[in-house]
Image (spheres, helix red, strand yellow):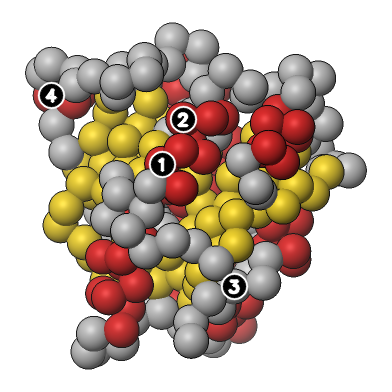
């Protein structure tokens, strides 16, 4: 039987962490393991996660990429899914994506659509284009086989908040995902999120693009096929809360 690990990375997220954990508990296809990576929180986040029945691992390093890599090293599942502590899954998230990966043609990972919601207990809808469903190439929409995660490799800490964008660019160079047309991630739109700083977003995006261009040039000099860029038209993807979305 396929085992699924649900991963939550958190640092000082006591206010919103219970919402995320509640959405994991509400899954129609319950994960076999809930793993919380706690970045040395000072607000009791680790104790909250433990009270919800999660296996808590304390992060000794720093940063989001380090936390994600620690989760991959600690996860016991054949399939791994990530959820940020301030976001929520719809109840059918894992069930739909597990079925998508089992259906032919077999894919090594799946992504889904997301919708931005208000930062409240009800996940209230946001009016206008910002609240419209969109395809999310972001860890919260991901369900991936261990073999794909091992092949793509770790999240790169030196890219900071661009680490997720870079990972999805490398994953796209390896395989095409199964794309779920339904909204499976409710992504909280927060005024204090990293995406509230456009200059920081642009810096992270261009750092990732520069890394991909350098990789293409190195591959060309070596006579090997170049890896795919994050977007076919060369436009850097937009980063939302440190993660790339279309």
For discs 3 and 4, the disc positioned in front in the rendered view: 3
Question: What residue is pinned by disc 4?
Answer: 129
Furthest-left residue in view? Answer: 128
Residue lying at 41% horizontally and 79% vertically, measured from the top left: 108
Is any atom of residue 10 visible in this view?
yes
For discs 4 and 2, the disc positioned in front in the rendered view: 2
* Residue 121 to residue 201: above or below: above
Question: What residue is pinned by disc 2?
Answer: 19
Question: Mark 3 to mark 4: distance in Å?
Answer: 37 Å
Name the foreground residue: 83 vs 238. 83
Question: Mark 1 to mark 3: distance in Å?
Answer: 19 Å
Labelled pair 1, 2 in contact (Cβ < 8 Å): yes
The first of marks 1 and 3 along the sequence is 1
Question: What residue is pinned by disc 3?
Answer: 77
- Secondary structure beneath disc 1? helix
Q: At which x and y percent is residue 106? A: 30, 87
Residue lying at 48% horizontally and 86% vertically, measured from the top left: 1
Labelled pair 4, 2 in contact (Cβ < 8 Å): no
Question: Mark 2 to mark 3: distance in Å?
Answer: 23 Å
Q: At which x and y percent is residue 228? A: 40, 68
Name the foreground residue: 64 vs 227. 64
- Secondary structure beneath disc 3? loop
The mark total stands at 4
Question: Mark 1 to mark 2: distance in Å?
Answer: 6 Å
Residue lying at 75% horizontally and 34% vertically, measured from the top left: 46
Is any atom of residue 157 visible in this view?
no
- Near mark 4 (Cα within 10 A), the count class, few <14, some 14-19 or many ≥20, is few
Question: What residue is pinned by disc 1?
Answer: 23
Figure quadrant of the C terminus: top left
The first of marks 4 and 2 along the sequence is 2
Determine whether, in the image, residue 102 is placed left or right of residue 158: left
């Amino acid at each position: 039987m396929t085992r699924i690990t649900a991963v939550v990375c958190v640092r000082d997220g006591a206010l919103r962490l219970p919402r995320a954990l509640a959405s994991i508990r509400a899954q129609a296809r319950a994960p076999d393991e809930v793993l919380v990576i706690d970045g040395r929180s000072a607000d009791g986040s680790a104790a909250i996660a433990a009270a919800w029945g999660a296996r808590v691992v304390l992060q000794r390093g720093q940063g989001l990429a380090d936390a994600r890599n620690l989760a991959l090293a600690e996860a016991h599942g054949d399939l791994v899914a990530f959820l940020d502590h301030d976001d929520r899954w719809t109840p059918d998230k894992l069930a739909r994506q597990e079925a998508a990966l089992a259906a032919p043609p077999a894919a090594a990972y799946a992504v889904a659509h997301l919708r931005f919601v208000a930062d409240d207990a009800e996940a209230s809808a946001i009016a206008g284009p910002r609240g419209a469903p969109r395809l999310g190439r972001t860890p919260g929409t991901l369900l991936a086989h261990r073999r794909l995660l091992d092949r793509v490799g770790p999240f790169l800490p030196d890219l900071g908040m661009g680490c997720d964008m870079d990972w999805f660019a490398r994953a796209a160079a390896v395989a095409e995902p199964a794309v779920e047309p339904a909204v499976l991630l409710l992504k909280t739109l927060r005024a204090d999120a990293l995406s509230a700083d456009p200059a920081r977003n642009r810096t992270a995006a261009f750092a990732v693009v520069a890394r991909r261009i350098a990789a293409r040039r190195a591959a060309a000099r070596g006579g090997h096929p170049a890896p795919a860029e994050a977007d076919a038209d060369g436009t850097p993807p937009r980063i939302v809360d440190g993660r790339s979305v279309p």
